[in-house]
Image: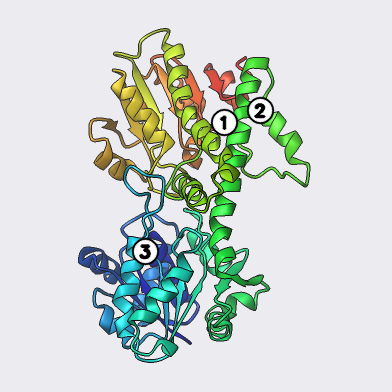
Amino acid sequence: MERIAVFGTGYLGATHAAGMAELGHEVIGVDVDAAKVATLASGQVPFFEPGLPEMLARHIASGRLRFTTDAAEAMAVADVVFIGVGTPQKPGENAADVSYVDAVIDTIGPLITRPTVILGKSTVPVGTSSRLIERLRALVPNPEHAHLGFNPEFLREGLAVRDTLTPDRIVLGVDPRDPGRVEEVARRVYAAIIDLGTPFLVTDLATAELVKVAANAFLATKISFINAMADVCDASGADVTALADAIGLDERIGRTFLNAGLGFGGGCLPKDIRAFRARAGELGVEEALGFLREVDDLNVRRRARVVDMAREAVGGPLKGATIAVLGAAFKPGSDDIRDSPALDVAGSLHLAGARVKVYDPQANASAAAVWPTLEYVDSIETAVLDASVVIVATEWREFREADPAVLVTLAARPYVIDARNCLDVDAWRAAGWAYRGLGRHST
């Protein structure tokens, strides 16, 4: 058992803290937000993540997990520190804001009085960890006590508990001047996971920092590629889903992340590829990642494309049209509406004069905080009632399995835009719906 402090108790930090307790460690979560700490300490999770509330409550009850706003209290007992604070996009820039990471280093540095391993998990620009080591050594009373490594996170919202406890790999970046202590402690922390046969990769710090952003850049490129193919399919009469199935059988390509639709959003992919480009510019290799600009632009254009499809569906201006938008979260299994394509489409339709009824199984409340002027309803049926266009904008299972024969009796006009290409086309058409997908056969 290790004594662990996790600084930052947002999505990453709270999940990681509970996950470490599940692995048998003694964990204390630290945050400057007293309200958030109080919520977590009471066993409540302030966001939606399947399986996390149960794991959190279980280990608060077991005594292995607690939360505090007092950094000194945490550092008095912790031998291992994880940094899991946010690195948002800087306002008006593409670059990542690492000030919260710097603040953790500034806070814990003077409090380190014995050998302590600090592992960064927050997604940071390449080169950050090396800078933090120098910053840390200037603050620690005895620099020999501070050992810093980088251990990127690979959480998928909706699957974060599984990704914490059974990841597909563990990556650890170490300073070549101080490799042994960091790796030794990390192997102890993750021993139960490593024993399952999970690959444990040890690299230099810069490589470890690049793993997360490089993976996200690749996935974003794959999504935008198939969406570009959807435009070609729309123009040529081909079907993008059949195309994806065919090229996905090539083992060099694979089928995952080849689902054409409204595009990606959330708190990771968009900001990470923008920050990656910004960092490449700082390193003097901006042209190497120039393609990511078009990846980003193509992704954003998908949203305008769906709004245009709605306009085509009503046969003119959107003003006065009643439109149901099914989904507000950026993906199913989450209530996260950061950079959500679904909510962006709903807002654009509203600004164009439409009456927009939004239903999301989990994200209505968080969406209403951003777009309070939209009309939020509590069921698919209420959303579809009297709608002249229905847009499936987030591929929740509830939407995929909805009965089109029931919904057709509620709509003013049975016209569905499947912006995630997730519906059973034949079933919806058989029930009397006019169906439009992105890159799909229209008839």
Query: Label 3: how many residues lie within 10 Å, few (<14), some (14-19) or many (20+)?
Result: many
Colouring of the image: rainbow
Is residue 258 at least partly visible in the picture? yes
Q: Which mark is residue 85?
A: 3
Residue 52 locus on image (x, y percent): 42, 63
CB within 8 Å, label 1 to label 3: no
Residue closest to the far left: 34
Where disc 2 sits, the SS reads helix
Q: Is residue 264 left or right of residue 88?
A: right
The reply to whether dot 2 and dot 1 touch (C-beta < 8 Å) is yes
Q: Tell me the residue that label 2 is attached to.
A: 240
Of discs 2 and 1, which sits in the foreground? 2
Can residue 409 be seen in the rendering of this structure?
Answer: no
Q: SS class of the residue under badge 1?
A: loop
Mark sitting on residue 442:
none
Establish if 172 lies above or below 318.
below
Quick check: 102 above or below 125? below
Q: Is residue 326 above or below residue 336?
A: above
- Residue labelled with disc 1: 421
- Tag in front: 2 or 3: 3
Amino acid under label 3?
Val
Q: Is residue 404 above or below residue 287?
A: above
Cα distance in 3D space between marks 1 and 3: 35 Å
Tell me the amino acid under the disc marked 2.
Answer: Val
